[in-house]
Amino acid sequence: MKKIVLITLVLAFVTSCGSKDKGELVGVKGKKWHPEKPYGMSLIPGGAFVMGKSDDDLAGIQDAPTKTVSVRSFYMDETEITNSEYRQFVFWVRDSILRYNLAEMADLEGKTSDDEGIGEFAYLSSEEEELTPYEKYMLDTYGNEQRKINNDVDLIFETDEYPDELYSEVLDNMYLPLDESYNGQRTWDVSQFEFEYSYMDIQRAANDKSLSRSDVIRKEAVKVYPDTTVWIRDFEYSYNEPMHNDYFWHQAYGDYPVVGISWEQAKAFCQWRTLKKNIYKKDKGKQFVNSFRLPSEAEWEYAARGGLAGGTFPWGGPYAKNDRGCFMANFKPLRGNYAADQALYTVEADAYEPNDYNLYNMAGNVAEWTMSSYHSSSYDFSSSINPNVNDESYDRKVVRGGSWKDVSYYLQVSSRDFEVDSVQRSYIGFRTVQDYMGTDVTANQATN
């Protein structure tokens, strides 16, 4: 026993002698970190505001009584997520699945990276120089699930450039069958575009300490392709086929807000955006970023107000026109004269003037998903600091801001609406937020 104590003391002495902290409490230093403003986002300084309807509730819904709440600082997308941005997600999912299918086919046929054709897309083996010692260990220890896809080889989409018949077979299986094609065009089988991710259910873990970590790890698989048929299904006895055919894919609409996205798909997009950024951060040896996510209902309203206390709209109000008689947003004015605001459907995501937080179209254009569940009385029982009611068993989720097909009441920053989380609409899109790190920033600090 004395020998063990003596060894411990000797090790402690040696460690202390080799230390550069001079025996002082200096803390453990992590990776060097600097706050980074996410691309395309604005910083929304935290603060308090009166949430709810400060003027008459003309619709008589009475689900938004006034309540003073505080929110922490966060970043928010300056525009709604566009078709172009969402296509980046869709293509990433498609290409990832395609690379996996090519690697599986190469493995099935016994092809390796030394072989030409589909062999170039084979899994990297433990003998490959590209694998780090850690990756080799994981592959040898945990087996095939740790196999690494070769992402350095460009995918080939032109049929006359396919390298061999095995590659052709894999690509063919990613398209709809020939008998479902028309006008000589093959169409992707978008039902295969599925994004899988996992996350920790922190709320459940905090409320039930008896659960193990594996009990609160949630796994989701979401089909990511937007439902383009919403343009037909949402409007009976109406000719909207051009929007169905072109709106998501054609570059003419690249800067327009994506629609036909469910709450579940918007949540999956946030997970992918976090993953994509952190892959880059890992390659650069930098600290990971906070997760991108949907805003809470309170965050959305606070940001939409742009620092204007008691304003009816993001620009203040109380009217939907400016002093020159021009409409300030894209909505349904004058009992259905859609063209009066210079647009029949949606407009570019950065159209009209931004609010004082440099956020565009917080009223009109497309309504926006929030992370919050809709309860008509949630203001009565939610917290007054960072309030959020997110009951995953309740499938009604709050949408805010009104859209191109709504009357001005739904454009008011305090108006609440909802939709079922699995439903897709031609008038609902979303934007993302990210928590702010560092010294707190507040918009309305109390003065001494």
Image (cartoon, grey):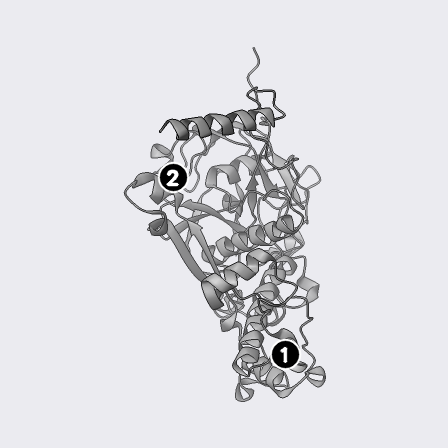
Looking at the rendered structure, the kind of residue marked 1 is: Gly
- The kind of secondary structure element at disc 1 is helix
**C-alpha gap between disc 2 and disc 1:** 61 Å
Indicate which label's residue lies in the foreground, 2 or 1: 1
Badge 1: residue crowd in 10 Å (few <14, some 14–19, many ≥20): many
Q: Position of residue 241 (x, y in %)?
A: 58, 72
Residue at point 53% right, 50% down? Answer: 367
- The kind of secondary structure element at disc 2 is loop
* Picture quarter with the C terminus: top right
Q: Is residue 437 above or below residue 271?
A: above
Disc 1 target residue: 119
Looking at the rendered structure, the kind of residue marked 2 is: Asp
Q: Position of residue 357 (x, y in %)?
A: 64, 36
Disc 2 target residue: 63
Q: In this view, does 395 lie above or below 54?
A: below
Dot 2 or dot 1: first in sequence order is: 2
**Foreground pick, 15 / 72:** 15
Residue at point 66% right, 80% down? Answer: 115
